């Protein structure tokens, strides 16, 4: 796909086709591409857990559904869970000196690479920020001390999940040129 098409066709899917699993080869391609994402001092302060096991995926879906949220996760056929790993000394020191949270920035960039790579593979996605972190750590055996930063629900979109018009702030409110 052309880059512009990928960007415009990516949208948060809220209705996955529960009957259609995501092929492992596609998830491998997606994670291989995502690993090319840039990060502060090339620190890559993250771990990527890919879940396709049906029981585990159902449990992760449940962990995103507190207070009636994220019902669409029940029909997702795969989840990618991104946890933060310790950054390298250089990135950590630079972040401290400049008062920047590079690890979160790096994880956001990684996440963007993942969802765009998914679109390119015909896989729909929804980034999920509302989840029971403790429960997901238990389910995946991730150390209590570590933080899970994002979950990505994935699957093929259901037939009626059409491309929506993108709602964004007016360009002038976001973009400034200094010429
Ligand atoms: C950090 C982050 C957390 C999000 N959390 C959720 C979530 O818990 N549930 C959900 O349905 N969508 C979630 N979204 C998706 C946003 O609502 C969505 O990206 C935004 O409304 C723009 O729509 P689009 O992705 O279709 O372009 C999240 C997106 C981001 C980047």
Image: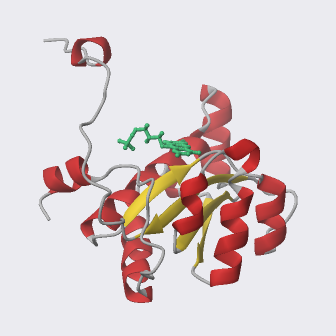
Up-down relation of residue 77 to residue 99 (above or below): below
- Please state which of residues 132 and 137 is positioned toward the viewer in this rendering: 132
Name which residue lies at 37% across and 81% down.
26
The percent position of residue 86, horizontal first and vertical second, equals 71, 56
Quadrant of the image for the C terminus?
Answer: top left
Quadrant of the image for the N terminus?
Answer: bottom left
- Please state which of residues 14 and 27 is positioned toward the viewer in this rendering: 14
The percent position of residue 144, horizontal first and vertical second, equals 88, 60
Please state if 105 lies on the left or on the right of 2 as rendered: right
Name which residue lies at 50% across and 47% down.
108
Up-down relation of residue 28 to residue 156 (above or below): below
Quarter assignment of residue 151: bottom right
Res. 161 visible in picture: yes
Please state if 88 lies on the left or on the right of 122 as rendered: right
The residue at the far right in this view is 144
Quarter assignment of residue 115: bottom left
Up-down relation of residue 162 to residue 81 (above or below): above
Res. 86 visible in picture: no
């Amino acid at each position: 796909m052309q880059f512009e098409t990928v960007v415009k066709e990516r949208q948060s899917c809220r209705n996955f086709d529960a009957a259609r699993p995501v092929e492992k080869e596609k998830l491998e391609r997606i994670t291989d591409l995502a690993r090319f994402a840039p990060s502060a001092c090339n620190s890559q302060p993250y771990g990527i857990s890919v879940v396709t096991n049906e029981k585990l995926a159902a449990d992760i879906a449940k962990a995103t559904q507190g207070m009636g949220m994220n019902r669409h996760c029940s029909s997702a056929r795969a989840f990618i869970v991104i946890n933060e790993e310790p950054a390298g000394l250089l990135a950590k020191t630079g972040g401290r000196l400049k008062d920047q949270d590079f690890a979160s920035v790096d994880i956001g960039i990684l996440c963007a690479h993942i969802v765009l790579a998914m679109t390119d593979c015909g896989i729909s996605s929804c980034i999920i920020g509302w989840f029971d972190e403790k429960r997901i750590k238990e389910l995946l055996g991730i150390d209590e001390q570590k933080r899970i930063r994002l979950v990505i629900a994935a699957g093929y979109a259901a037939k009626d999940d059409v491309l929506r018009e993108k709602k964004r702030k007016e360009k002038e409110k976001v973009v400034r040129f200094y010429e």
